[in-house]
Amino acid sequence: MSLKHSRRATLAVFGIILLSLAFLFSFLNTIFDELRRRPALTFGLTFSPSYATSLGLDWRQIFISTLDDLQVRLLRLPAYWEDLEPVRGNYRFEDLDWMLEEAGQRGAKVLLAIGFKLPRWPECHAPAWAHELPLEERQAEILRLLRTLVTRYGQNQTIIAWQVENEPLLEFFGSCPEPDREFLKQEVALVRSLDHRPIVVTESGELSTWLRTVTVSDMLGISMYRVSWNPYLGYIYYPLSPGFYRRRAQAVQPLTKKILVTELQAEPWVPAGILNTTLEEQFQSMNAERLKDNISFVRRAGFSEVFLWGVEWWYWLALKQSDSSMWDLGRQIFSQSAPLRGY
């Protein structure tokens, strides 16, 4: 055998050994992952009155059903600027007051999301009068909004933490201006100066490093999506393992008090919106079995506190489509929720 052929054979054998070791490592990692002790999960959910209304639903009815039927005791509520201050200088707190009162009467706790960029499309929720303001003037108005909210609700014991903005440093998503980390730091500093409760800042679980916000806040919130859609590739099923999230969390854990999953996918990701999409297509990216799998996934990733995303869709399915599979599963999930801890 020539020296050249001998080298090729050696490289081939070496490559086979490396591949075998890689497969073995992956297999053992899966086994150890299954044996690893799982934390008890505390479940909450995000609720958006405006999104419920867009589905043709009575948002107050859904909110009460969420508390009384699903027995949800942990909520993430966005305080939309456009709803709170439709006219400059004139605030409307009635709806937010009502939700906090109803939640408090039942012993539920609230992570209140405040600021300009908050959950649900179009991500940035400025009132019409604020759209054309120069940047510095708009930022001054945002700080005034934060001061007003934290001062008003500073004594409300239903609120356990403040979420300042939502994925504020994520680019290319939503109708929003360029991210501004320095302004985010100003917002966090203002809220911290006004109240002692923890401050949460959120990041995309898949599209960011988590490092740009973890040192700004007291707690880090991440989103977790298993299926998404874009116009170039269609539906994308992320090939990420629980270990991907777990190792990232372990890397940044020393820099933060707590890491939460503030947005776990529990509704479809569809390009044309729920009302313009067939049920068949909706169920491609979310259904009861997928949600069960997502719950198992987040448990294996090692997180202990999870906010589900999509209760408005569950209710729409049950009321408008006579399909209670998601709502029934939600009832089961929240019946198994562990007590809230760590605030």
Image (tube, rainbow, N blue to C red):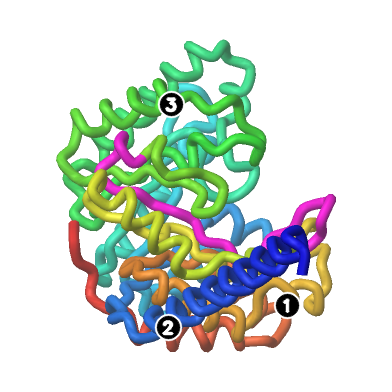
User: Which corner quadrant holds the C terminus?
Assistant: bottom left
Q: Is residue 238 above or below residue 316?
A: above
Q: Earlier in the sequence, mark 1 or mark 3?
A: 3
Along the line of sight, the residue nearer the viewer: 294 or 6? 6
Along the line of sight, the residue nearer the viewer: 136 or 71? 136
The span shown in magenta is: 214-235
Q: Nearer the viewer, mark 1 or mark 3?
A: 3
Q: Residue 283, which numbered label?
A: 1
Q: Amino acid at mark 1?
A: Phe
Give x and y (percent) for residue 216. 31, 34
Q: Amino acid at mark 3?
A: Arg
The crowding category of the residue bearing disc 1, from other C-alpha atoms within 10 Å (few below 14, some 14 to 19, many at least 20), is: some
Along the line of sight, the residue nearer the viewer: 247 or 319? 247
Give x and y (percent) for residue 299. 40, 76
Q: CA distance from mark 1 to mark 2?
A: 19 Å
**Res. 158 image quadrant:** bottom left
Q: Is residue 18 above or below residue 85?
A: below
**Residue name at image x 36 percent, y 23 percent:** 144
As drawn, is 321 to the left or to the right of 303? right
**Res. 52 image quadrant:** bottom right
Which structural element holds mark 1? helix
Callout 1 touching callout 3 (CB < 8 Å): no
Q: Which residue is mark 2?
A: 333
